[in-house]
Image (cartoon, rainbow, N blue to C red):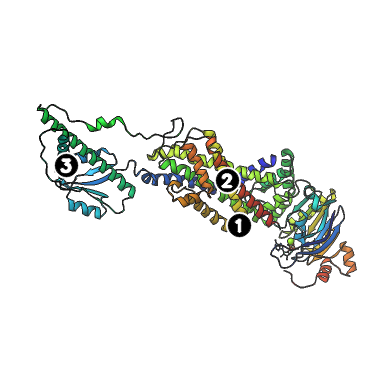
């Protein structure tokens, strides 16, 4: 125990000598976390509350165009641009602007769509009236199919297109249904002979009995979160930054070998195990501290940039244990890298780049759910995947230790493999 | 205090063996010199004695303990001063010595006192809180010796403790070794300075190509080889050709 404590103190002293290194170890990941959260804020919000300008060309000027326009404007995501420089947008102009990429979307309502919808509605009303045995006819003519024209900038994402087409389709159906109902009503009125005073049926209000509501599957209902930039980036880059403690670990262990201090330690009686434990403990504590500093940034600094505050779930103990286990895995990886390479010039680039690769594969850069199915399987080879998944389990799914222990076991497994490789190389080196 | 027999060692990736059947022994309570040209196998022998390097074959007994079974006991009883400075360069002398002392299991109070005494004895008290890498060559050597003394080893093994130090430092170190011997401890040391060995050592062993060439009291070796100095004996026995 005394040896462990002495080693922790010694590692602290060694670490402290390189103040610039200490500062960088803490500040760089902090800067990274803040910058990534800010940069990715927009993409994360893209389909949530970023507005899209839609060029709206109304050549119809009828009821139908009016109602569809109003309907679309009720959707927060879209803003209709009806005029440019005080003049109504024209079809050719709209097409040109989308072509140039200045606008993402243009919708052109050709002349006569309203009339066409009214004609169809009259046809339906007449047919229904006929079947019910009612006399009289609303004016009707042959249908002349008309199209709403919609133009997308080619770079528009598929999800965006679908979302707009759905909205348009919904509006169209709604407007058509309302016109049909109004026509039917008009026809009934004509039958009974009584005049005005009957309110049109508010279809929207009437049909609100069943609606769709999005809820969270997380327990206790306390947590009701959509993932957002902060919620993804803070834990992700905190884990990434934590793994960067392998740089001082590998660097120090190689330097120890080079400057002969390791030789001195090895001549001292007693097993190397307690010394190794001391070294690991120091870096596990350091990594955990660094991780929580990163989370604190999500809690305290990011809201100042107008980003949402980090939600940390409701299991502080599970979070602490998870952080310790992640730090342990990272430390073990550092020891492994330090033992595999002869010089810092070999170990440090390998260490740094391998973390970048493991993080890319493990879903640190983009959530693993977006990756293709094959890559999602590869992600499981990265300890950073299991680390992030555990933190998400606590933060987003509101889980506790009972939810994350399988991840912790996998992380332990990684750590054990790393230490085993280190032990094996060190033994080979003695020969 | 030391019995080595038929020791063989070829390093991994090395073409030539470093030790090829080295056998030698030193008696108790003496200052013994392990001499030989560059690459003779002195450092390799010491590394095997303290467990840093594994021999391919042969046996070693130190202070009555067999290396194969009693390495832990041996480690407690010997102090090895490596040829290279084996200290944390960024830490101060006190920080280095505190850590090493604690790993040897020395109590805090006793350790503090020992560090103070030795730093004083080796003239380092003024630089006690200076990082080792800012030490001069002589100061580094002296700090390197203190680090191997803290646990008061019965047998002190020094690999070229006087290499690259000035006359003052060397005299100080040699005086200390004689003093340490007078306190009842044994010493084995290697050096290329044969005059120094001739003055200091009760017994010397000259090795070359990983084998023992000759062993005996310096005065006896000189008479036997009708030489006036150990250097003449050395050159007579190991030849004039360059090593390594
Ligand atoms: N780690 C190693 N790997 C390969 N060969 C080695 C290693 N250490 C030493 N040798 C070789 O073993 C031989 C003996 O080296 P050693 O260091 O024991 O000699 P030495 O007597 O201490 O020499 P010097 O007086 O120069 O210190 C040399 O040929 C050396 O090149
Ligand atoms: Mg040597």
For marks 2 and 1, give the one nearer the viewer.
2
Q: Earlier in the sequence, mark 2 or mark 1?
A: 2
Task: Say if residue A384 shows up in the picture.
Answer: yes
Give the residue drawn at x 34%, y 44%: A46
From the top left corner, tell me how far across and down residue B110 is, in percent.
Answer: 74, 40
Give the label on residue A329, or none. 2
Give the label on residue A120, or none. 3
> Measured along the vertical axis of the image, is residue B188 above or below residue A6?
below
Question: Which residue is at the front of the view, A325 or A122?
Answer: A122
Q: Which residue position holds label 1?
A: A341
Q: What whole-number distance in Å separates the C-alpha atoms at marks 1 and 3?
A: 78 Å
Give the residue drawn at x 25%, y 43%: A168
**Mark 1 nearby-residue class (10 Å; few <14, some 14–19, many ≥20):** some
Q: Is residue B42 left or right of residue A275?
A: right
Host chain of mark 3: A
> Measured along the vertical axis of the image, is residue B229 above or below residue A75?
below
Whereabouts is ligand 1, in terms of quadrant? bottom right
Q: What whole-number distance in Å separates the C-alpha atoms at marks 2 and 1?
A: 19 Å
Host chain of mark 1: A
- Image-quadrant location for residue B102: top right
Q: Are marks 1 and 3 in contact (CB under 8 Å)?
A: no
From the top left corner, tell me how far across and down residue A417 is, in percent.
Answer: 61, 49
Q: How many marks?
A: 3
Q: What whole-number distance in Å separates the C-alpha atoms at marks 3 and 2?
A: 68 Å
């Amino acid at each position: 125990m005394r040896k462990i404590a002495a080693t922790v103190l010694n590692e602290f002293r060694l670490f402290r000598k390189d103040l610039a290194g200490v500062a960088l170890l803490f500040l760089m990941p902090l800067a990274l976390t803040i910058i990534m959260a800010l940069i990715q804020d927009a993409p994360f919000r893209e389909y949530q509350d970023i507005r899209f300008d839609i060029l709206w060309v109304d050549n119809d000027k009828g009821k139908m165009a009016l109602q569809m326009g109003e309907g679309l404007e009720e959707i927060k995501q879209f803003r209709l641009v009806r005029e440019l420089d005080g003049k109504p947008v024209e079809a050719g102009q709209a097409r040109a602007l989308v072509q140039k990429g200045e606008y993402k979307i243009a919708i052109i309502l050709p002349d006569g769509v309203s009339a066409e919808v009214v004609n169809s509605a009259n046809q339906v009303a007449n047919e229904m009236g006929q079947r019910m045995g009612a006399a009289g006819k609303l004016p009707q003519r042959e249908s002349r199919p008309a199209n709403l024209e919609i133009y997308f900038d080619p770079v528009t994402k598929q999800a965006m297109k679908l979302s707009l087409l759905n909205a348009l389709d919904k509006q169209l159906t709604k407007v058509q249904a309302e016109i049909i109902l109004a026509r039917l009503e008009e026809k009934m009125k004509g039958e009974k002979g009584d005049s005005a005073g009957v309110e049109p049926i508010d279809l929207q209000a009437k049909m609100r009995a069943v609606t769709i509501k999005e809820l969270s599957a997380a327990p206790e209902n306390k947590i009701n979160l959509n993932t957002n930039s902060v919620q993804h980036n803070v834990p992700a880059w905190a884990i990434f930054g934590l793994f960067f403690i392998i740089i001082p670990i590998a660097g120090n262990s190689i330097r120890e070998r080079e400057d002969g201090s390791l030789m001195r330690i090895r001549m001292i009686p007693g097993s190397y195990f307690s010394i190794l434990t001391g070294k690991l403990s120091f870096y596990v504590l350091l990594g955990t501290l660094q991780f929580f500093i990163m989370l604190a940034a999500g809690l305290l600094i990011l809201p100042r940039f107008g980003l949402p505050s980090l939600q940390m779930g409701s299991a502080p103990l599970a979070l602490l244990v998870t952080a310790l286990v992640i730090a342990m895995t990272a430390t073990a990886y550092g020891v492994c890298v330090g033992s595999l390479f002869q010089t810092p010039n070999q170990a440090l680039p390998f260490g740094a780049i391998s973390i970048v690769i493991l993080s890319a594969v493990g879903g640190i850069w983009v959530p693993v759910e977006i990756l293709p199915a094959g890559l999602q399987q590869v992600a499981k080879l990265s300890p950073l995947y299991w680390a992030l998944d555990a933190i998400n389990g606590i933060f987003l799914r509101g889980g506790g230790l009972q939810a994350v222990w399988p991840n912790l076991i996998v992380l332990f497994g990684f750590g054990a493999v790393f230490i085993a490789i280190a032990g094996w190389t060190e033994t080979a080196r003695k020969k | 205090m030391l019995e080595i027999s038929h020791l063989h060692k070829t390093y991994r990736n090395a073409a030539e063996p470093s030790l090829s059947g080295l056998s030698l022994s030193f008696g108790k309570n003496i200052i013994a010199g392990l001499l030989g040209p560059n690459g003779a196998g002195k450092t390799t022998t010491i590394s095997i004695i303290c467990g840093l390097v594994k021999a391919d074959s042969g046996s070693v007994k130190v202070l009555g303990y067999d290396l194969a079974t009693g390495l832990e006991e041996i480690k407690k009883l010997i102090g090895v001063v490596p040829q290279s400075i084996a200290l944390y360069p960024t830490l101060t002398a006190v920080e280095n010595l505190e850590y090493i002392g604690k790993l040897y299991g020395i109590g805090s109070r006793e350790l503090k006192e020992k560090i103070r005494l030795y730093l004083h004895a080796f003239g380092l008290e003024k630089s006690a809180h200076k990082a080792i890498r800012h030490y001069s060559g002589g100061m580094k050597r002296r700090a390197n010796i203190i680090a191997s003394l803290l646990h008061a080893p019965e047998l002190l093994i020094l690999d070229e403790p006087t290499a690259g130090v000035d006359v003052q430092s060397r005299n100080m170190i040699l005086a200390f070794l004689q003093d340490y011997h007078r306190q009842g401890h044994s010493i084995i040391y290697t050096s290329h300075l044969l005059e120094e060995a001739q003055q200091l050592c009760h017994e010397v062993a000259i090795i070359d190509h990983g084998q023992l060439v000759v062993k005996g009291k310096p005065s006896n070796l000189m008479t036997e080889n009708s030489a006036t100095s150990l250097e003449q004996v050395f050159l007579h026995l190991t030849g004039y050709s360059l090593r390594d």
